[in-house]
Image (cartoon, helix red, strand yellow):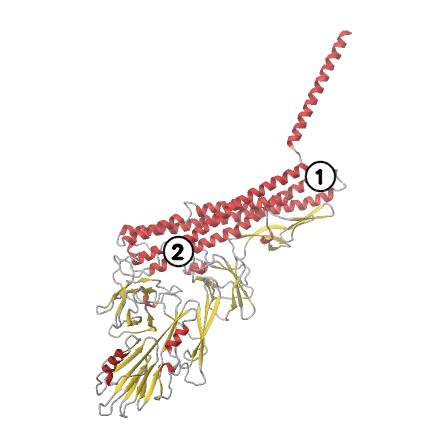
Amino acid sequence: MRTDTANFAELDAFATQIAQLDSVIAGANTGLTAALDSFFSSLQAVADSPTSLPARQLVLSEGERLAQRFNVLQAGISAQTDNVNSQIRSIGSEVDQLAQSIAKLNGDITAAQGFSTSDQVNDLLDAREEALRQLSELVSFSTSEQDGNIINVFVGGGQPLVLGSNANRVVTMDNPLDPSRTELAINVNNNLQMVTDSFSGGNLGGLLRYRDDILDKVQGNVGVLAIAVTDMFNAQHRAGIDLNSNQGIDFFTPINTDALMRERIKASSNNGFPNDRDASVSIDNVSQLTGSDYRLNLGGSGTLNYTLVRASDQAVVSSGMLSSSFPQTIVTDQGFSINLSSGSFQNSDSFLISPTLSAAESMALNIQDTASLALGSPIIAGASLGNSGTGVISQGGIIRVGDIDSQSLPAFATAGQLSPPLLIRFTSASTYDVLDNTDPLNPQNLSPPLRNQTFAPNQSNNLLPQDLSATYISTSAAHVFSAQIGIIGSGVSNGYPDPNPLITSETITVNTVNAATGSTSVTSVNLLAGESAATAAARINTLNGVTATANTSATVNIVDDGDAGLLRIRFNGVTLTDPALGTVPNPLTSDFLAERINQVFAGSGTSASSDGTLLTVRSVSGADLRFEEFGTDANDRLEIVNINGAATNILVFNNQEAVVGGTIDIITDAGSTISTSGGLFTNPTPQPLPVYLGYQVSLAGSPNVGDTFSIGFNDSGAGDNRNALALAGLQTADILDNGTLSIAQGYSQLVAQVGSQTGAANIDREAVQSLLFQTTARRDSVAGVNLDEEAARLIQFQQSYTASAQIITVAREIFDTLLGAFR
């Protein structure tokens, strides 16, 4: 009976509370669905008419309405939290009073045994039984009988509530880590022991289960949604330009203000003095946020260690050692970082980390002026008038103008310009370089370079790195920027991976972590002695998480005195000075050699150019460049003055040959790292450089060698709707749950989950209520009073009394008649 009473009370309290929450998050006046739809509809409208001031004002109005709807939703959830806390305090007081009453009745029953009538003892037993029944409505408990007439009461796993005629006092208190959370404690010798987890069942158990399993998760998920909407919209809005061609500012209040970051971490009230810890929590990656709170625990003496425990499942998600000095930052894979700035951090310190706290409550519109709405794109692209191919470049679009820390990327660090402007130069029909076009007369490689990128003709190609976390690694050994020299026919190679004959291979290993599953894959390849950069790059491309390209270049000065002793040159096995290929000038010129190389090697990826003095030869595939000089004049020679972009001075003469190997550039995907045994990549763990630019352009058609395309700053934002389209597109962008859910899907999923749990709770409540009715009926049939049966008996008694009265009346009348006859 008590068990069924406790079960029903628990389910009744749970179902009542979750129904209220369901009405809050799914309500037409409090939910987010309608506000989200209206907001994105206004963006679609302004994309059709970006210069319309009414359309721009509507975007601001709907943005403010969306922020206010988040505020209202959070207020409703906070009201639920306050209500739960109030009920816990009330129930805690009732539990305490009933425990004291049961303890007193235990004493009274013991005292009454042998000194009072059985009716008096039974009254006390009935009173105790009723107190136990009332307690079972509040909380589940177990009992044990002592000395035949004493009932001891235990909650949870054996926590004593009543022992004989003594009861532990139940009180409520604020959680030391989170003062907004009411907890239950037992006062033992004036020492409060928090025992909330020891209570289950009854109204109290239903409230606690609702708070822990439903309310906390919903509040965390709503916070994630608020942060996601704010962060993604701010990032995209900053990627545009407004009506005055100024770069966009945050549309909503930023997620990492100093005040918000400090609110996300709370020190336990049990931490040691002095209370001087200065800490904050910054959001780094919205897609990794879980909505859960965390507990940061410090331990150790001297050098402190830390553990970070996720509250939702008690998993340790991060641990390590702290340095002895501050400030320092604990970076996690949960979407946030913990910044420990200063203070007396000590052994046994603990902190509550609430990454999504106040996100929905504090959400607000950050801009008020319609002209500040950044609907245009800051970049513009175009094709050079002298292009001979059919390549068509898009106007481009912004991916993100900030890095993972929301700091401006270098391309957008200076207002009113793109830093640097870019030039796309095609080195073949299928390869191109991305160059710094700050000086249009002398474009330079970027740092790090983006060269020899692959292009597929006659289809749309993205030209720039797309991944925010993409990084660049390149060969760095000295022999990559030199040449190997020897007598012709002596077997000279490029010297890769290392000129040392004892080093015959180099192992490249790629470690890739899957962001969605956390699983790790390790792949590796051996680069063999003498193989070209082209071959090595192709084999590196078989590894997971990396893209490798190769490139070889050499600049040569031709020294030919023009006398009878001819300068004879063989390049990559072809005698360039063979008269069979055409007339050969004397002296040889760089112009002639460039023309001859382009004639012989057309379509192979190897080409040459001349500035009238120097000959530059390049292989866009990374093939080796082999130069042989076998003329008859000792004064004639080749002077290699630049190899792969590095100045040098290597002479090739008197039947010598020089072999130039290429560079290998590797771009790693997010989550991939490279290690090497040494050789071409001299550092065992090459240090990657970021290559993400923050914007993208695409090109279709079939460009020819030498075709160029420029990318610069758009200084006219009026009438441009490219960023408006990007903002509207955020409605379906997958940014939640590691990039698997959109904002609308995330909220719909939350509403559906709460709705489903509400329905299940009602069904469970009805089932247990039916069981309670049956249990009550069985009890009443044995030990209780059946009112219908007793009413029938009363009627029988009434009828008997009425008949008896009639008999007495008749007898009295007969007796009176007899007496009258004798008078």
**Disc 1 residue type?**
Asn
Determine whether label 2 and label 1 are within 8 Å by CB.
Answer: no
Tell me residue 172's x, y (percent). 57, 51
**Disc 2 residue type?**
Val
Tell me residue 613's x, y (percent). 24, 83
Mark 1 Cα within 10 Å, few/some/many (few <14, many 20+)? few
Q: How many badges with numbers are in the image?
A: 2
Q: Which numbered marker is on residue 229?
A: 2
Tell me residue 453's x, y (percent). 33, 71
- Residue 91, above or below 736: above
Q: Which numbered marker is on residue 577?
A: none
If the image is split into quadrants, where does the C terminus sit?
A: top right
Q: Is residue 74 visible?
A: yes
Looking at the picture, tell me which residue is in the foreground, 218 or 645: 645
- Residue 757, above or below 703: above
Q: Secondary structure at mark 2?
A: helix
Mark 2 Cα within 10 Å, few/some/many (few <14, many 20+)? many
- Residue 431, above or below 167: below
Tell me residue 36's x, y (percent). 38, 51
Q: Which numbered marker is on residue 122?
A: 1
Based on the displayed image, in which of its 4 quarters is residue 241 positioned? bottom left
